Image (cartoon, rainbow, N blue to C red):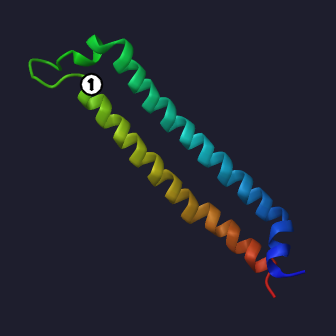
Amino acid sequence: MDRIGRIREHPGYHELVRRRRRLAWTLSAIMLVAYFGYVLLIAFDKALLARPIGAGVTSLGIPIGFGIIMLGVALTAFYVRRANGDFDARLKAVLDETGE
């Protein structure tokens, strides 16, 4: 059996794929709920987002929209940190165990 076949059959590889997939779907769901929640808020409660903040001209929708963007950045940073730490270490262990 070649190395790729041994990697595909390795239980550590299956665990890595399962964990990575679960994290990716969880982070995607968080982002989709936040984004579509914001869009639905725009569609059904424009008055809430149009409220000015304090005595200024900036409405409440601007910081909420900025927060959605920052959430995307934060979730991406979290995934990258997890991938570079835990996932890379697990992959290296699988590759070391299935090496020639």
Return the x and y of residue 89 as percentages of the image width and height.
Answer: 65, 69
Disc 1, SS: helix
Q: Residue furthest right?
A: 1
Compared across the picture, whether 53 is left or right of 29 comes to left
Q: Which image quadrant is residue 66 in?
A: top left
- Which residue is rendered at x = 80% and y = 72% of the image? 7
Compared across the picture, whether 3 is left or right of 52 comes to right
Return the x and y of residue 52 as percentages of the image width and height.
Answer: 17, 18
Circle 1 residue: 61
Q: Residue furthest front?
A: 43
Amino acid, disc 1: Gly
From the image, which quarter does the C terminus lie in? Answer: bottom right
Q: How many marks?
A: 1
Query: Observer-nearest residue: 32 or 13?
Result: 32
- Which residue is rendered at x = 47% and y = 46% of the image? 75
Q: Which image quadrant is residue 83 in?
A: bottom right
Compared across the picture, whether 94 is left or right of 74 comes to right
Return the x and y of residue 29 as percentages of the image width and height.
Answer: 56, 36
